[in-house]
Image: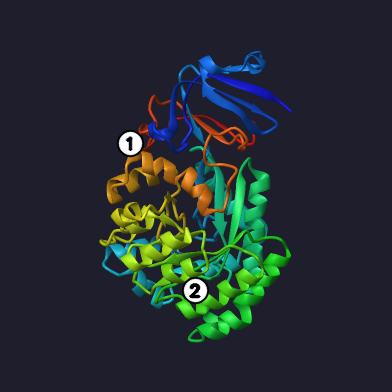
Amino acid sequence: MQKILYTNARIATMVQGDTPYGLLDHGALATENGKIVWCGNRVDLPSRISSWPKHDLESRLITPGLIDCHTHVVHGGERSKEFALRLEGASYEEIARAGGGILSTLKATRSLSEDQLIDEALPRVDEMIGEGVTTLEIKSGYGLDIENEVKMLRAARRIGKLRPLRVKTSFLGAHAVPPEFAGRADAYIEEICLSALEAAHQQGLVDAVDGFCEGIAFSPQQIERVFTLAQSLGLPVKLHAEQLSNLDGARLAAKFHALSADHLEYLDEPGVAAMAKAGTIAVILPGAFYTLGEKTKPPVALFRKYRIPMAVATDCNPGSSPLFSILLTMNMACTLFQLTAEEALEGATRHAAHALGLDDCGTITAGKRADLAIWNVDHPRELSYRIGFNPLYSRVLGGDI
Ligand code: DI6
Ligand code: FE
């Protein structure tokens, strides 16, 4: 396969070390067979590589391809009516309890075929790709019966074949109690959710298992049933935890050595400590915080104190975060939660990879996949700085430009 030598580049390797962003001002980067084979200062380029076909980047910036590690981008319909209701004062929880919220997207999602779901999702996904996203996590959770959960996951996986994009799927059967089980959450978990997980796993459609631990969704005990099955199937878990209240979800996630706990606005210090001990990554989702007019911020200072890596993601969904832009998300993480611009870029690269259990992407290092984003900017902090401006020049996936 193709050998390429990128020259005249600034490179934010995102490798942890003495230099912020792992930045190389006069860098070169070589890819072969879909992998990065060399990256360093131009002057150190080995002679065996220096004759390879060159791509002069004219001082542009290379970063790892961006990773959006928490999305619900596959779904039917839209919820602008709820947007209007919230502007009139209704809360997200009130709308959910009145049968709107996730359940309204459930109806729309069930009514679409797999092909139709894909058709609705592709324009959203294309926006993401256009901002340099090379790996995208997609959750189920709007089907909430066996057939429709499997349908969502299949649609998600097919998107990864229809587009130059790496897709990772999370089973989110424990997202809401469907109307046919209203008031019988335990029965839904036992009779549907566990079987749906087994069926989806049997078809090879599940990379991780997620849940929504919240008053309007499932209790820690109910989530534990799902996680126990996930564990026995050898699947890693992650959890929507402490988004609207503190049910000790992060501690449950840590008990199962979760890849990540996500949202975390209401997390307390014991929960943070448990996550640190388990190596669970904090995924912060400023889009939902912003959309819901939340006032309580995730405990970023505690994440730093306990050295918990923070990933940053869109949470792209039709209700609480109709947000498609990973760049805007990085800006929001800085402006709303006071992340540094470096932390925001780490959150959408290195830490996002780990939140998905991936070791082969997220930094620019020899041996990793050649998943790259090339930008018309001088400094990596610019990626978090502007609002509504996309400086992407080019994107590389598995070595292909
Ligand atoms: N938390 C979220 O932010 C999304 N799911 C969840 O558990 C919201 C889903 C929705 O409102 O449709
Ligand atoms: Fe979510």
Camera-nearest residue between 130 and 195: 195
Camera-nearest residue between 335 and 151: 335
Pointer 2 residue:
176
Q: Position of residue 111 (x, y in %)?
A: 60, 67
Badge 2 amino acid: Ala
Distance (Cα) linking label 1 and label 2: 36 Å
Q: CB at mark 2 closer than 8 A to ligand 1?
A: yes
Residue 155, relative to residue 343: is it above or below?
below
Residue 363, relative to residue 159: is it above or below?
above
Q: Quadrant of ligand 1?
A: bottom left
Residue 44, relative to residue 2: is it above or below?
above
Badge 1 amino acid: Tyr
Q: Is residue 165 left or right of residue 382?
A: right
Q: Position of residue 306 (x, y in %)?
A: 35, 56
What is the quadrant of the N terminus in the image?
top right
Mark 1 is surrounded, within 10 Å at the Cα level, by few (under 14), some (14 to 19) or many (20 or more) other residues, namely some
Pointer 1 residue:
385
Q: Position of residue 303 (x, y in %)?
A: 35, 55
Camera-nearest residue between 363 and 86: 363
Q: What label does residue 1 carry, if any?
A: none
Q: Residue at x 47, y 66 (%)?
A: 254
Q: Residue at x 32, y 54 (%)?
A: 305
Mark 2 is surrounded, within 10 Å at the Cα level, by few (under 14), some (14 to 19) or many (20 or more) other residues, namely many
Secondary structure of the residue carrying tag 2 is loop
Residue 173, relative to residue 121: is it above or below?
below
Secondary structure of the residue carrying tag 1 is helix
